[in-house]
Amino acid sequence: MNIAIVGATGNVGRKILEVLEKKELKIDNLHLVASSKSLGKKIKFRNKEYDVVDLDNFDFSKVKITFFAAGGKISKEFAEKASKKSLVIDNSSFFRMDPEVPLIVPQVNSEDLNNIKKNIIANPNCSTAQLVIALKPLHDLFIIKRVVVSTYQSVSGGGKEPMDELIEQTKLALDGEKIDSKNFTKQIAFNAIPHIDVFSDDGYTKEELKMCYETKKILDDKIDLTATCVRLPISISHCESVNLQFEKPFSLAKVRKALNNFEGCKVIDERSDGGYVTPLEAEGKDETFISRIREDKTIENGLNLWIVSDNLLRGAALNAVEIAERLIKNDSYAK
C-alpha cells in the first residue's frame, strides 16, 4: 500500500501521521507532500525520517490513496488531477456538496462508499462529523425531526496560525498590553466570538450552513437543523449543545444504551459535579463523548445532549484514516 499526504506539515496532516502511527495499516511507501516552502523539512514516521516533497512536481501515480489536508484552495487546484491517478480522501470543504462525491463518516454512512464516481471522497466539517456520529443511533431508533445546535469550537479549527495567536493574545492580555487580532474578527483571548467563516445574505455563517447541508447529505435530508457556531479561546476539541426532537417517544435508558453501543461514541453522564466531559479531557481521544443527557420537557419527544470531541481527530485525521481503512477492508480502493 502506497500512501501520500498532501499538507503533511500542517495541523491535520501531522494528525493523520499520528493516527497512522497508531493503526496497523500496512504502508509500503509513504510520500509526504507540501508546498515548496516546506522543502527540506524532515518528518519522522515509524522510526524513519521522510523528506517533504514538492506538491507541484509530485507524481500521484506512485500511490493508491492520497490524503488532502491542505485546505480548499489546494484541493481545488490539485485534487481532481490527483484523482485521475490515485483515490483521494479530501479534508477540505471544496467537494463536500458535490453530488458525485460521497461525504463520509464511516460509522454513519459507509454504504455511500459503494458510489464513488470521481475517485474522490470528502471528509465532513469537524463540527458535523462529531454531531452525526452521535445522531445516527438515535435517528435509527426514534427518527429525528429537528436539531438545534450551538457549537463552542476551538481555535485549532482555523489552523496553526489561530492557535499561535491565542497563545500570543493570552500573554498580551495578562500583561495588560494592546491586542490587535490577525486571524479573528475580535480579540479571542478571554472572549467568545459568535462568528466562524463568512456571513451569507440570510445572516447565517458558512460554518452554520455547512452543518445543516452536510448533516442532511450524510444522515437524512428530511432532518431540519439550525445552528449557531461560536469560537472559544481553547486550543483543541469542539463542544456542542444539542437539542433534538424525535418523531417517536424515547426513554433515557434507551438513549444511553444506543449511544454507548455505537462505534465511536462514549457516554459519560453522571449527574454530579464533574460528571461530564470538557474539551480538555477529549483532547487526544478517539471517542465522541456524550454528557448531560436529559429530556426537554418543553416539547414533545425532546432531548438535550452535550457532545465533545477532538476536532483534529474525529473531525479530520481519524475520520479520514477510518475511511481509508474501510476502503481497504472492502478492497474498494483498487477500483
Image (cartoon, helix red, strand yellow):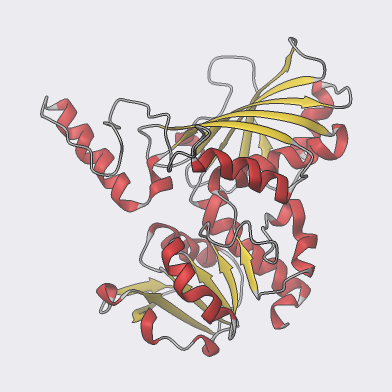
Query: Observer-nearest residue: 13 or 56?
Result: 56
Instruction: Please name whichever residue, 67 or 282, is drawn nearer the observer in this view of the structure.
Output: 67
Compared to residue 159, the image places residue 195 above or below, namely above
Q: Is residue 160 visible?
A: yes
Report the side of 39 relative to 262 (left or right). left
Residue 193 position within the rendered picture, expressed as x and y whole percent measured from the top left: 38, 29
Q: Residue at x 53, y 70 (%)?
A: 67
For the C terminus, the image quarter is bottom right
- Residue 143 lies, with reference to residue 95, above or below; the image says above
Residue 229, percent across and down? 50, 33
Horizontal and vertical percent for residue 297?
75, 10
Quarter of the figure with residue 103: bottom right
In the image shown, does 98 or 70 lie closer to the viewer? Answer: 98
Say whether residue 70 is visible.
Answer: no
Quarter location, residue 178: top left
300 sits to left or right of 64: right
Quarter of the rendering containing residue 334:
bottom right
Relative to 119, is 132 above or below? above
x 86%, y 23%: residue: 250
- Is 96 situated left or right of 196 in this image? right
Residue at position x 55%, y 85% in the image? 63
* Residue that protrudes farthest toward the front in the picture: 201
Quadrant occupied by the N terminus: bottom right
Q: Is residue 63 above or below residue 145?
A: below
